[in-house]
Amino acid sequence: MQSVATVALPRIIQGGMGVSVSSWRLAKTVSLLGQLGVVSGTAMDTVLVRRLQDGDPGGLVRRALASFPVQHWVKPVLEKYFRPEGRKGQPYLRLPMPSRLGDTASQIMHVLGGYVEVFLAKEGHPGLVGINLLTKLQLPTLGTLYGAMLAGVDYVLMGAGIPREIPEVLDKLAAGETASLKIDVTGWTGTEAPRLHFNPREVLGGVQTLKRPHFLPIIASNSLATLLARKVTGTIQGFVIEGPTAGGHNAPPRGAPVFDERGQPVYGEREVVDLEQIKALGLPFWLAGGTGSPEALQEALARGAAGIQVGTLFAYSQESGFEASLKRGILEQAARGEVRVFTDPKASPTGFPFKVAEVEGTLSQPEVYQRRVRVCDLGYLREAYQTPEGRIGFRCASEPIEQYLAKGGEAAHTKGRKCLCNALLAAVGMGQLQKNGDRELPLVTSGDDLERIGRFVRRFGTEYSARDVVAYLLGTSAPSQPEAQPALANG
């Protein structure tokens, strides 16, 4: 087992909210306050090239890229995507969607995307920074992780699936060795599952050992915690235990599906994690989902947790990546007690329940969703499947229905599916202008805490800082460094 240096445990983990809601600015602010700031690792390659096309105000992306250790990968990216004067109303140039496993050009872009975001979050201070990835998004994982590690990331957090291979991946990447990841392929009939390989030497031209970040899987059951703690190659350093009130993707309820009068999946006692069993595993844990209050932090500590992970309060702070007018409008709506969050069982192409804030002018409104012309031009949530010829193809339940059916998909899987890739980019001000002249509209994901945020907004206003959030959660009148916490155990 790999020895891991001890570090003080943060009481607050700022949730990793994608796409780019958990921006480097947000993560850096939280980190400077002595807590764990977390950047989103979702679609960072697209975020990188869209920032460049929007003129890269302040030269921040270019400064990060200038520090990348192998500049021959950087030059063609700047030549193709950097627009000093911005796009001037033109559509964004898109990155090609990978059409096969191990596409080198795609992997390099994932490396650069992960590197830039973590570099900017960590620049100029020694605080802790993590990166959050979705297990379901498999093709970008290895490159994004390696880029983040090149920039010195301290923690990796992953949910939306079972990240059982990630501890070994981190070990190998830290040692400069080739890492691989099993790829889920629907209908695969081969004797061995396809694997995606990543060789750091192909990026750096040689071997470089790196700091191995701590790994915190995001879990929703005792059985998954036990599996990851005892039956994986490599080590984990703790858990984030996330309940179904958290934003983004939720774990589906176990057993036969049951829905409430609004059509939301119903979660019961089977989804309640037994914290005594978690404590018996001997690893620190943080509670997430409905934990955005000082009372929740104190309760978590009393139950043996190291602290809490909080998303919603940070998501609407000034430092988050949400587009400013969208953010302000939602907070004004929340302050009046008029915002609702819907756990949509169909919105995500992954099939996982997905939290959606019901906001006027967004894809949460059925009539707005129905007007959108289906297109799949980003492809992060595509499903790999075996073609009749025995090869690997890619399809998405949110793509044009005739295309999905032609690839062997079932019509039932397309109902209610939303293009989260385009919608979440639109929510951070990077909406695409499509060929038919339509501009992609946003979709906002938030935890159930959004319905209770009014008290906080009335106290701190609609233009509050992440500093206000940390001070509020710690119960202090002004942000301060937390007292020293127990060291993270080795191994």
Image (cartoon, rainbow, N blue to C red):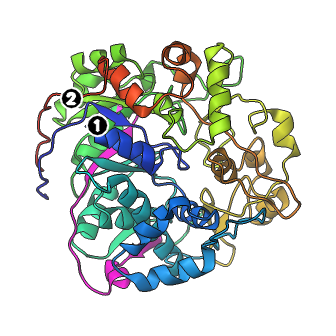
Residue type for callout 1: Gln
Element assignment for label 1: loop
Position of the N terminus by quadrant: bottom left
Whether residue 195 appears in magenta in the rendering, the answer is yes
- Residue at (48, 28) in percent of width and height: 313
In the rendered structure, the answer to whether residue 8 lies left or right of residue 398 reads: left
Task: Say which of 417 and 371 sits in front.
Answer: 371
Query: Which region shows up in magenta?
Result: 192-221
Circles 2 and 1: CB distance less than 8 Å? yes
Badge 1: residue crowd in 10 Å (few <14, some 14–19, many ≥20): many
Element assignment for label 2: loop
Residue type for callout 2: Pro
- Residue at (68, 28) in percent of width and height: 329
Which residue in the structure is indicated by mark 1? 35
Residue 303 image offset from top left, x and y in percent: 24, 18
Which numbered dot is residue 266?
none
Q: In this view, does 395 lie above or below 326?
A: below
Which numbered dot is residue 482?
2
Q: Is residue 390 above or below residue 431?
A: below
Task: Name the N-terminal-most of marks 2 and 1.
Answer: 1
Whether residue 24 appears in magenta in the rendering, the answer is no
Mark 2 vs mark 1, CA separation in Å:
8 Å
In the rendered structure, the answer to whether residue 49 lies left or right of residue 389 reads: left
